[in-house]
Image: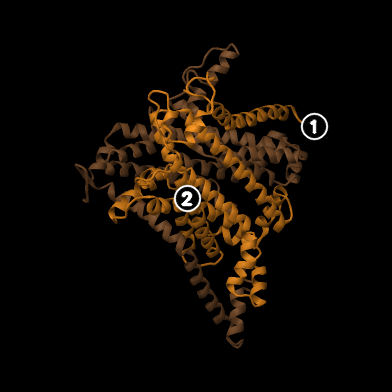
Chain colours: A brown, B orange
Amino acid sequence: METAVSSERARLIGDLATERPEGEIDQLVARQRSRNAWLLLLPALTVILVAAVAPLVTIAWVSFWRVDGLYLVRTIDTEAWRSVLSDPTFYRLAWSTVQTVIIVLVLVGVLGLTAGYFLARFVTNRKLQALLLMLAILPFWTSYLIRIITWQPLFGNSGVINFLLGKAGLPQMELFLFNQRAMIFAMTSLYVVFVVGPVFWALSRIDPEVIAASRSLGASAWTTFRTVELPLARGGLVVGLFFASIFLFGDYATGRLIGGGTNPMLSDAISQYAGSGQWPVAATLAVVLFGIAILVLAIFMRIYDLRKEL
Amino acid sequence: MGLSRGQRIFRVVGGAVFALILIILYAPFLIMGILSFAERTTAVFPPSDFSFISYQKLFNPNDFSLYRIPGEPLVNYLRPIGLSVTLALLTSVLATTCAMMAALAFRERFPGRGAVFYALLLGMVTPGIILGLGFRLFADQISLPTGWRTTGLLTHIAWTMPFGFIVFLVFLNRFDRTIEEAAAVLGASAWTTFRTVTLPVLAPAVLASLLFGFTLSFDEIQRSSLVLGRDQTLPIAIIGATTVRITPVLYALGSLIALVSFALVAFYLLFFERERRRFYGTPVIEDEEETDMDVASGPGNAEGTQA
């Protein structure tokens, strides 16, 4: 960038006489570019300030308010925080949220990595590879709710799975609905699409020469995978898990529709407290959830700086 | 190259996992298609009676003579569909515009660049329910009425804009800026340069960003439930309907949406591929490898990553 003749500089050199010292033009260019940059950022920053920063600040603030009857009272009151922190249900809720997220991420990661690796290394026909890849990422673009609402006819007691099991002469399955297992399985099926694609792209970018070198030096396929391919594909895996967890933390609908509210996530609890007008408690839980989510995303960023993928 | 025993085992396991994922992903659509022709209930499979009545109910929500099942909920999905499409179109256009301008700004160095980068991603990384709750409370404080035109639209833009922003950054970091400079040196104004040089090269990114904006907004539920006021988008209507009772009408709706979205995305991917080929010459997978080489060695990227 330093060596390139920039458009602004070209124009300025034309406008100002060339006797101007080089340093002065550089300064002018830098100032103008900085000003242009802020002008270009204005719409995006305005939206983010109004629809993200202000809401987050409001939440932290409201968590110290009080509800009086139907009205919110602006005060500094630690009641919501005290009632949340002294309630054992809260710790169970926070733990079950973290536990669910971790289990789903592990499942999604293992399945996505296996499928992505299979696609990149064992499907050698380029056309078939492209088709399979498209099939694996296409559902990302379709409605998530639509995929969720077929769960009941699939796994209900008189649903498709039991119908097929019955046809095959196998014993019927116990109810795979309205419990945590079902919720985890449903979330895995929803969010695995995020991992397959990025892992595949990361793996297909690795120079085949590197793998050939590793193998010819005597490393087994497993050692090559562990010491060469996995570290190089780490970026893809982290990208996928990062986006999966963005959706996971706020997903209250899956828990409600499939988990049946038996083992709710923090997100579901927030939406229920908000629905019943207990805004300060909802805000307190939201602050906690925000902290957990940002912590997890920061861990991902530490494992692999996602800005390298830009 | 001969495969070792471990590799042969993996090929079987990996293939099975891949097949399993495809089944998990597509079985729901198949089941939904079948159940949309069921007349009465969707809880029992296979359905005992087949008819098109659910599709009729979907398109004629006010024709009460179609509703013959006792206790069947009456839901009009047509209005929510209209609102969702309007909101998604507006969101995708506005979010793409904001995202492109922001990404163009990020080609420059300016004070606070790193902080602004993370701030712009806030709308994406904050768990949805939190933003919904926060914006609802904030709107109450500044007496802004909640509804799709106000809080709804802003929430959807804040949610989808970061996705577009990332797409544009990825493209711009591989963009050879000297062609813009050539245009400027040859006398083109800044606007002409943008319109005739920058924008055509960015066309695939614009398309990708529009698609992100539309689909994410059309499907958005986490943030919307608290900020839409009395307005009902399709996801809100669907969630509302499921809490009452799931009827085959919902599956008729789902089947049609799935068909339309698959067609739309397939069309998009083909168009995208053509645009890419026009400007970059090589098919997607080869191109991916090539751009990676640029990433490894190109100075443009080093600048982009040290935001």
Q: Position of residue A178 (x, y in %)?
A: 42, 25
Which numbered disc covers residue B2?
1
Position of the N terminus of chain A, as image quadrant, is bottom right
Q: Relative to B55, is B198 above or below?
A: below
Q: Position of residue B204 (x, y in %)?
A: 63, 55
Q: Relative to A3, is B244 above or below?
A: above
Instruction: Kindly identify the residue that appears in the image at 67 percent across and 77 percent down.
Output: B186
Q: Nearer the viewer, mark 1 or mark 2?
A: 2
Chain containing mark 1? B
- Left of B3 or right of it: where is A102? left
Chain containing mark 2? B
Instruction: Kindly identify the residue that appears in the image at 44 percent across and 40 percent down.
Output: B235
Mark 1, secondary structure of its residue? loop
Q: Relative to B56, is A209 above or below?
A: below
User: Toward which corner of the image does residue B20 lie, by quadrant?
Assistant: top right
- Left of A177 or right of it: where is B9? right
Instruction: Kindly identify the residue that appears in the image at 43 percent across and 28 percent down.
Output: B67
- Left of A116 or right of it: where is A243? left
Q: Residues within 10 Å of mark 2 (few under 14, many from 20)?
A: some
Front-most of residues A299 and B289: B289
Q: Amino acid at mark 2?
A: Thr
Q: Residues within 10 Å of mark 1 (few under 14, many from 20)?
A: few
Q: Amino acid at mark 1?
A: Gly
Disc nearer the start of the sequence (1/2): 1
Residue A198 visible within the image: no
Which numbered disc covers residue B86?
2
Mark 2, secondary structure of its residue? helix
Q: Position of residue B183 (x, y in %)?
A: 66, 72
Instruction: Kindly identify the residue that appears in the image at 32 percent across and 35 percent down.
Output: A90
Q: Position of residue B231 (x, y in %)?
A: 38, 46
